[in-house]
Image (spheres, grey):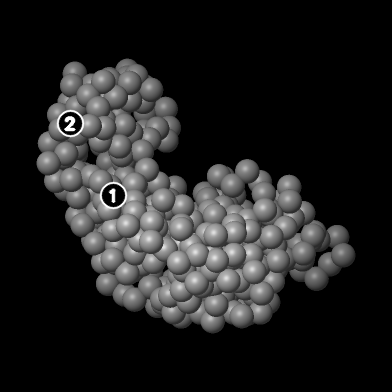
Amino acid sequence: MGWIDLRSDTVTLPTDKMRQAMASAQLGDDVYGEDPTVNRLQALAAERMGKEAALFVPSGTMGNLIAVLAHCGRGDEVIMGNLAHTYLYEAGGISALGGVHPFTVSNQADGTLLIEDIQRAVRADDSHFPCSRLLILENTHNRCGGVSLSRDYMLAAAQTARDNGLAIHLDGARVFNAAVDQGLPVSALVDMVDSVTFCLSKGLCAPVGSVLCGSQAFIYKAHRLRKQLGGGMRQAGVLAAAGIVALEEMVDRLAEDHQRAAALADRLRKVPGLRLVKGSPNTNMVYIEIDPALGISAEVCAAQLKAESVLVGITGERQFRLVSHFWIRDEHIPHIVSAFGKALA
């Protein structure tokens, strides 16, 4: 058995059909807007999201950064959760590169921000304060266990933002997981936001890239920002081709990842010394914790698991995140559970 890599769905490799599409892709210069495969991907992404236009970008981090820079000016403020990916894991780019100030409020266990907390975070019109410009939401929410935010919540949060003069950006890295989880078209989870990014290179299995979607005017501005940030990729159709296959063939099958995460969680909860945390399982993520009484750290446990060809993501002193994806199979689950049993023995 090869490696069973549960660290993230970013480790997914392109499918055979993606590789074939990449090899035969029609190419042009995308900086000039002349790559037909990139143009097709962008049109398909905009259609799926119910937005006017889309922009292919190298990463979700760049897509989120471009969105903030397009919505905000230097000295403006963006409201987001204290567990948001943009706040924790994007190298402070909105501040370092955009001069945009983050105002964080506490994420609830279900990934939401309390409506009253959003309202309180909006600055008064006072020269002492930065100007509140943008609300960022995240769906699914990674650090809150992979939970998906409902359409009703998204509508309520978006209305609160609009009532207070804020634009709304959605970090939708795994928004297709949220849509599959809720049995909704993805457009129903993003029609209330001004802009959204989603990743092609996680559960959808493409090797590289994300897409930023919004209005024609927004994407026109975003295109210039992408160039400023070094994101112009000439014959990028070789990458976009895999993204087209991802959108056309890999979305509905995300339900299989969710089912395997649930099956894995059901087995792991029976392993002595382990407990599920963060409401696990949610979508394709399982968060687990080692009983402190065992005196085993996550690092020691992870090393033992690696010896059994199982790779896991460490998220705390005794905590792990396990992520199901296309390359995790039903037959892997007994081996994963057995490996944990050995590591904790």
Q: Is residue 186 above or below residue 285?
A: below
Which is nearer the eye, 55 or 138?
A: 55
Q: Position of residue 46 (x, y in %)?
A: 48, 76
Instruction: Locate the C terminus and report the quarter of the image it occupies.
Output: top left
Question: Of callouts 1 and 2, which one flags the residue occurring earlier in the amino acid sequence?
Answer: 2
- Which residue has dot 1 on it? 325
Mark 2: which secondary structure? loop
x 43%, y 75%: residue = 44
Q: From the viewer's perspective, is the residue at label 1 or at label 2 nearer?
A: 2
Q: Which residue does the image show at 55% across and 44% down from the upper left?
A: 89
Mark 1 crowdedness (10 Å alpha carbons): few <14, some 14-19, many ≥20: many
Q: What residue would you read off at disc 2?
A: 1
Task: Name the kind of residue labelled 2 in the image.
Answer: Met
Q: CA distance from mark 1 to mark 2?
A: 17 Å
Q: Residue at the spot x=67%, y=49% of the render?
A: 93
Q: Is residue 83 left or right of residue 78?
A: left
Q: Position of residue 261 (x, y in %)?
A: 23, 49
